[in-house]
Amino acid sequence: MSTINLTLHVWRQSGPNDPGGFKDYQAKGISTHASFLEMLDVVNEELAARGEEPIAFDHDCREGICGMCGMVVNGRPHGPQVETTTCQLHMRQFKDGDEVWIEPWRARSFPVIKDLVVDRSAFDRIIAAGGYISARTGSPRDANEIPIPKEASDLAFEAAACIGCGACVAACPNASAALFTAAKLAHLSLLPQGEPEQQDRVRKMVSQMDAEGFGHCTNHFECMAACPKGISVDYIAKMNRDFLKAMITARTDLPKREKQ
């Protein structure tokens, strides 16, 4: 089993209102079969043994599903490997003697809590703004009860693969959450169960996205390049079309609502 030695430059910040900065650590004898988070575990064990404060970082499933492990590695969200979360990034991607710079997501809407941990609750509020769907979904139904075109189901499944990690925001020069919001909207609007509230949902979620302080999408496509699930920017175009249609419809319906 081969091992490597690395010099880590890790962003350390005690709290949201405290100044932060990079601090250097030596990661020695790291197995190339270890994941990036396992490497940080080894470093933290050594820090704890010396009585020093371990590096705070988010993690949960460590299987590329939960989206908790977001951090910027050498200037790239989740690190150098395409369509890979930080927890699935393995140390064989690095060479012996490499210097590795590790920092949190950089966005005003993702304030740093501590070290590499940021507050991504803005994403939760965007999802909550969409509300619920009125169609019955709580019990199993026959797979063929509602005919759904394969193209639509495939696109909905692709959009639903979004894990809400925030890499799209971290990669975007404008710190836009357009790809995240578009994916969450698409996986509902493409299926029959999500159609009744589609227009209200897109209006509310886009408005909440703007209220959270995320920037606007200006087609840099960095979000798609950084997304660990490879979600396409085509969903942003769909969201923009749906939003425009929803706003026009809302204004058209306004006189009717006032008469009622």
Image (cartoon, grey):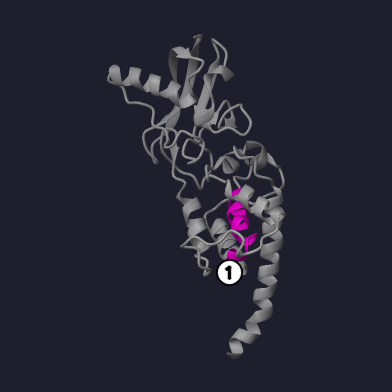
In percent of width and height, residue 132 lies at 50, 65
Residue nearer the viewer, 145 or 105: 145
Q: Secondary structure at mark 1?
A: loop
Q: Tell me the residue at 48%/41% (across/down).
A: 66
Q: What residue sits right under mark 1 in the picture?
A: 197
Residue 178 seen in the current view: no
- Looking at this view, name the residue that lies furthest to the bottom: 259
In percent of width and height, residue 112 lies at 44, 40
In percent of width and height, residue 246 lies at 66, 69
- Span colored in magenta: 179-194
Q: Is residue 124 left or right of residue 142?
A: left
In percent of width and height, residue 206 lies at 59, 60
Residue nearer the viewer, 225 or 100: 225
Check disc 1: other Cα within 10 Å, few if <14, some if 14-19, many if 20+. some
Q: Is residue 255 above or below residue 16?
A: below
Main SS of residues in magenta: helix
Q: Is residue 192 magenta?
A: yes
Q: Is residue 221 left or right of residue 66?
A: right
Q: Is residue 113 left or right of residue 212?
A: left
Residue 227 seen in the current view: yes
Quadrant location of the C terminus in the rendered image: bottom right
Q: Is residue 120 above or below residue 114?
A: below
Occupied quadrant, residue 47: top left
Q: Tell me the residue at 70%/72% (across/down).
A: 248
Amino acid type at circle 1 is Glu
Q: Is residue 140 magenta?
A: no
Q: Tell me the residue at 61%/40% (across/down).
A: 229
The number of numbered badges drawn on the structure is 1
Occupied quadrant, residue 228: top right
Q: Is residue 208 above or below residue 11?
A: below
Q: Tell me the residue at 65%/80% (across/down).
A: 253
